[in-house]
Image: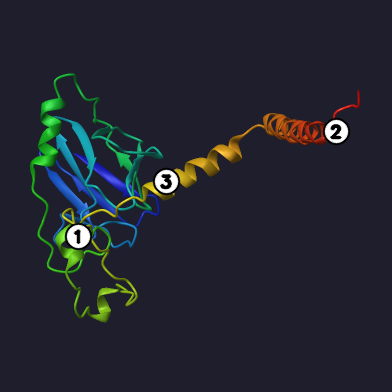
């Protein structure tokens, strides 16, 4: 036999050999802890052959052993501190022993018991799953007690029609854009050289016309 004593000495949980107890806030649990930090079905403890095991049942606020959060089933020993949410207990069991190497299979028995069906709302552990089809349909009237706000400005996103023709590209416009890009990407030094060559060509043409209009020298 083993005991879980609350640190405030207000609660004593007695665990007999062979028992597999469900601890939580729901009245149907084997051990009911009336604390808002404790989930409706918070954890299970099992005493088999002098080995006391505990597993968290995906509770909202977690289960901690010696101030470390449980991520897998664990073995409790005399003097350990186990916390269900903010409800803290000390382990009283001088005859408790360590888990043996072949106890892994027995530990799985803790999770074999199905969760209890709750007859009331389980706000601490309730989750809502929404499919893609539900998102495409109007929500309709939602009761105020549900605590869900719906914005009237939200509209479904229009889906793209795969058969819709894509807009045609303008070849002339694409060519103009390519020319503009070339002009913008031209090096300033190259541009200055081209302007110099153009100026020399114009000056040479003017000088050639000047020579052409000169009168021939008299003999």
Where residue 98 appears, as percent x and y from the top left, is 25, 25
Quickly name the residue at label 2: 215
Instruction: Estimate the spatial distance between the alpha carbons at disc 2 and disc 3, rounded to whole Å.
Output: 54 Å
Q: Residues within 10 Å of mark 2 (few under 14, many from 20)?
A: few
Tag 2–tag 3 contact (CB < 8 Å) = no
Residue 154 percent across, percent down from the top left = 32, 71
Q: Quadrant of the C terminus?
A: top right
Q: Residue furthest top?
A: 101
The answer to whether residue 26 is above or below residue 142 is: above
Q: Which residue is mark 3?
A: 174
Q: Is residue 176 placed above or below 37 in the rendered structure?
A: above
Residue at 54 percent across and 41 percent down: it is 181
Which residue: 26% across, 53% down? Answer: 166
Q: Nearer the viewer, mark 2 or mark 3?
A: 2
Give the labeled residue for mark 1. 130
Query: Which badge, 3 or 1, comes first in the chain's sequence?
Result: 1
Q: Judge by depth and name the residue closer to the eye, 52 or 140.
A: 140
């Amino acid at each position: 036999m083993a005991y879980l004593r609350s640190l405030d000495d207000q609660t004593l949980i007695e665990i007999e050999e062979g028992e597999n107890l469900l601890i939580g806030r729901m009245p149907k649990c084997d051990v009911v802890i009336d604390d808002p930090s404790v989930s409706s079905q918070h954890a299970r403890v099992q005493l088999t052959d002098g080995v006391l095991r505990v597993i968290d049942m995906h509770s909202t606020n977690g289960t901690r052993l010696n101030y470390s959060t449980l991520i897998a089933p664990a073995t409790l020993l005399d003097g350990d501190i186990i916390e269900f949410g903010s409800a803290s207990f000390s382990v009283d069991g001088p005859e408790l022993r360590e888990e043996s190497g072949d106890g892994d299979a027995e530990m799985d028995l803790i999770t074999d018991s199905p969760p209890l069906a709750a007859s009331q709302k389980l706000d601490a552990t309730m989750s809502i799953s929404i499919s893609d089809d539900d998102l495409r349909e109007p929500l309709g009237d939602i009761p105020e007690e549900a605590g869900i706000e719906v914005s009237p400005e939200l509209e479904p996103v229009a889906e793209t029609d795969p058969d819709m023709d894509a807009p045609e590209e303008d070849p002339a416009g694409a060519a103009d854009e390519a020319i503009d890009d070339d002009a913008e990407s031209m090096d300033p030094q190259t541009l200055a050289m081209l302007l110099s060559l153009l100026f020399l060509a114009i000056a040479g043409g003017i000088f050639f016309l000047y020579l052409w209009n000169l009168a021939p020298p008299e003999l």
